[in-house]
Amino acid sequence: MHDRRTARSTGPLASALAVLTALSSATVPALQSGQQLLDQANQTISNISTFELEEAIRQRPDTVLIDVRTPREIHLLGGMIDAPRSYNIPRGWLEFRVADTVPDPDTPIVVYCGINQRSPLAAATLMQMGYTHVSNYADGFFTWRDSGLPVEAPDLALDSMLFRKPQQVADGVWSAIGATEPPSYENSGHNNNLSFIISDDGVLVVNASDNYLLARALHEEIRKITDQPVKYVVLENGQGHAAMGSAYWKEQGATIIAHADTLAELKAHGEAILQRVLQRSRDKGMGTRLVLPDQTFEDSLVIEMGNRHIELLHLGSAHSPGDISVWLPQQKVVIAGDIAFHQRMLPVFEHTDTAAWIETWDKFAALGAEIVVPGHGVPTDMAEVTRYTRDYLVYMRAQIGALIRDGGGLEDVSSIDQSAYSHLDTYDELARLNASLIFRAMEFE
């Protein structure tokens, strides 16, 4: 008779039981703690000190710094190390995102975190992935920050919509300096400079700001400094971060002034600009709507406000339609607007006329300003903004002109050496794009 029990013992169930028995009798490796994994990583990686990191940034501006903390930590705990190529890639996403930021495996990379726990593991992972020049900054961000070394942050005023609160530039002249990064939800669109001039008969604001709530935040800071009402708001051009906060100032009774080309720009493209601002701002865009200037001018407009003589000047075509500067001749202070840049690379747009910008610069320099509040970057002097605005444009046009004369094409613009400007914020985003746009324009000059 066929033994059913024997059949079952030699079938699939018996095979599975045999596997389970073998697994249960095998030696199971002990669990490793996070500290053990960290100790193992530290045996394989190269650590550098604060001094060595300073030297690496100075000698090799192309060094990529990767902060592996979370964005929330960076936001709340003082920012991240300020370096020409500094990025945040959280440890949990490193393997999946690093190639987008660092495609060349031979690029020098320094990883860090707050207290040297995640960054050694990150360094070991990058080495396993094939990156050949990886170091771990063992002192960590807090040592760098507490040593007073350069730090960049998504927000330097956590109790305000402003990225940074106003600082005094000269007697009665103040500016809230924006982030040198593109506008974002984190910086509330405050990536340009929002300035104001106080007189004994009112306040003139330069730039309405990116949105309604940001304008209100700026007004709150103005009220802490003076009881004088805001009488005028001047738009340096028609870009969103200059104009989209106008609704707030209109409600305060201020007169909004712009160049005639800015009015034309806002009539033609204002709704599209507004939608981009609202999409990025989300809940921070509450109350933001398109409001057109009340008053325009062509070449210049003089405002006598109490004890202040203020000149609004359109010196010629430059960065954007309707670019203007605000000149205080008695103090030799110019609030330049987007004619002048430093700390971040200037952007070239489709409508930017770089040849005209250089010609306009000669008129701008002739003002003889001793203090320059640029469109982006901290207040400085003419030598600094000349180096990173006019001189950059002259260099790029010379390089592209030579390329065109030699029969080069658009695909060759990447060969232009822009390394002298690689330490500027937004270099990675703009260097190649600028070269392409200048080439396309110069082809038809």
Image (cartoon, rainbow, N blue to C red):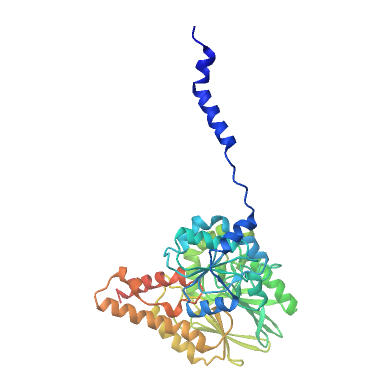
Q: Horizontal and vertical percent for residue 441?
A: 34, 73
Q: Where is residue 419, by image quadrant? A: bottom left
Q: Quadrant of the C terminus?
A: bottom left
Q: Horizontal and vertical percent for residue 193?
A: 59, 76
Q: How many numbered marks appear?
A: 0
In the shown orientation, is residue 239 left or right of residue 284? Answer: left
User: In the rendered image of this protein, does residue 209 appear above or below residue 34?
Assistant: below
Q: Horizontal and vertical percent for residue 229?
A: 71, 77
Q: Horizontal and vertical percent for residue 407?
A: 24, 74
User: Which residue is rendered at x = 64% and y = 58% of the image?
Assistant: 35
Query: Can residue 355 be seen?
Result: no
In the shown orientation, is residue 210 left or right of residue 443? Answer: right
Q: Where is residue 318, by image quadrant? A: bottom left
| Near-viewer residue (192 or 27) | 27
| Near-viewer residue (85 or 333) | 85
Residue occupying the far top of the picture = 1
Query: Can residue 19 be seen?
Result: yes
User: In the rendered image of this protein, does residue 15 appear above or below residue 230?
Assistant: above
User: Which residue is rendered at x = 24% and y = 77% of the image?
Assistant: 406
User: Which residue is rendered at x = 48% and y = 80% of the image?
Assistant: 59
Residue occupying the far left of the picture = 407
